[in-house]
Each structure stands twice: as C-alpha cells, then as structure tokens.
Image (cartoon, rainbow, N blue to C red):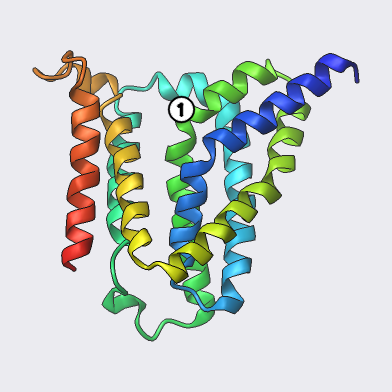
Amino acid sequence: MDMTFWLALGQIILINLILSGDNAAVIALAACRLEPAQRSIALWWGSLGAVGLRIGLTLLATSLLAWPGIQLLGGAVLLWVSYGLGAPEAPSEIGESPVQGRWRAIRTILVADVFMSLDNVLSLAGVARGDHLLLILGLLTSLPLVVMGSSLLLRLFERFPWVVVLGAALLAQVGGAMLASDSLWQRLPWGPWPHAALVFSLFCAFLVGLLRLRS
C-alpha cells in the first residue's frame, strides 16, 4: 500500500464524516425514545447496518441516481420519517417491548440512511475509484466517530427536548431538497426556477417543525 492509498483513505474518512452530520441526527432521533439500555445497541447496529448499505450503494451509485424518480421516492420517504421521528409516541408504540422498540429504531435508521446517502456516495465512489478495499476500510474506520456524534446528539436531545423538533425539521429539509433534485421534478412548470429546490426544502422544514410544535 503506497502513499496514494493512505491519502485516498484519509479523504474517504473525512468526506464520510463531513457528509454524515444529517445521518448522525437521524440515528439520534430514532434512538432517543428508547430505554437507555437499548440505545447503545440501536446506535451501533443501526450505524453498522447503514455502513454496509452505504458500501453497496457506492458500488451502484451512478446507475441508481440515473433512475428517474429514485430521488423523488427518497425525498418522500425522508419527509415521512422526519414527521414520525419528531412525533410523540404513536399508539402502536405504547406497550412495545424494549427489543421491539430497538428493532423499530434500527429499521428507521437503515431506511433513512439509504436515501440520505444516495448523493453522498457519489463523492465516496469518486475518491475510491473502484478500489473496494479502500472504500470498506474508509467507511468502517469512520463508524465509531459517527456513533460518537450520534451519542452526543442524544444527550443534547435529552437535555433540550425542543432540539428534537429542530432535528426533525433538518431531516425534512434534506428530504425536500432531495425530492426537488429528481429529474421528474425538473419537468414540472416551476422545476427550472433556480430557487425552487431551496424554497421547497425550507417549506418542508418549516411545515414539519410547525406540526411537531403543535402536536
């Protein structure tokens, strides 16, 4: 392994950490309603599963993003997830066992991370240049740091519950921006307007935040 390999590895770790801020917020939001004993399990398994999915997505990134409607679908899923994560406990969650709650949180983390990572993996694929070992090492090395970031956010959510609303609004903004980035969106009458994606994503963030404050 020459110096080029190590430089590329450092780039992948740095890019993944920079692009994983939203993902860490999702992980923390999904785990914040779990019992303390279940949180670390959900954080680690959710993050590990997300890394595995991100590796697979990176190998398929170019072809996946070329599919019309894939970002539209991803954005819609993230909007739904953002609304659910900021909400009080649903009736179906009351009486849920700790293990059931843990697996529900892990599923939420994986679903959200898949779509949130679609754009990110293009950057990772560009650095890896087909070197699968380099990609896997880079993502696995950054895993503990992502979990640490999620743990810090969890403590913040516990101390300041209103920050959960901000986290849900942030995720809604990401979902709105992804939805507005799809090629199908561009075919709409307002699609070509340069600021359409920004305005729509901010509207999504405002709407989800308002709904959560009123619930």
Residue drawn at (62%, 43%) of the image: 51
Above or below, 132 relative to 204:
above
Q: Residue at x 27, y 78 (%)?
A: 91
Towards the viewer: 25 or 102 = 25
- Tell whether 34 sits left or right of 90: right
**Horizontal arrangement in the rendering, residue 155 relative to residue 171 (left or right):** right
Q: Is residue 175 above or below residue 147?
A: above
Q: Answer left or right for 26 relative to 132.
A: left
Q: Is residue 150 visible?
A: yes
Location of residue 124 in the rendering, given as x and y in whole percent from the top left corner: 61, 25
Q: How many marks?
A: 1
Residue denoted by label 1: 119
17 horizontally vs 140: left or right: left
Q: Secondary structure at mark 1?
A: helix
At 24% across and 35% down in the image, what residue appears?
Answer: 201
**From the image, which quarter does the C terminus lie in?**
bottom left
The x, y position of residue 173, in whole percent, is 30, 40
Q: Quadrant of residue 165?
A: bottom left
Is 210 or 175 nearer to us in this picture? 210
Front-lying residue, 153 or 215: 153
In the rendered image, the residue lying farthest to the front is 160
Residue 123 falls in image quadrant: top right
Q: Identity of the amino acid at label 1?
A: Asp
Q: How far across and down, in percent of the image, does residue 145 sit?
A: 67, 48
The extreme right residue here reads 1
The picture places residue 116, in percent across and down from the top left corner, at: 44, 38
Q: How would you rate the neighbour count of disc 1 (Cα within 10 Å): few for under 14, some for 14-19, many for 20 or more?
A: some
Residue at the extreme bottom of the image, as rendered = 95
Q: Residue at x 48, y 63 (%)?
A: 156
- Does residue 106 appear in this view? no
Quadrant placement of the N terminus: top right
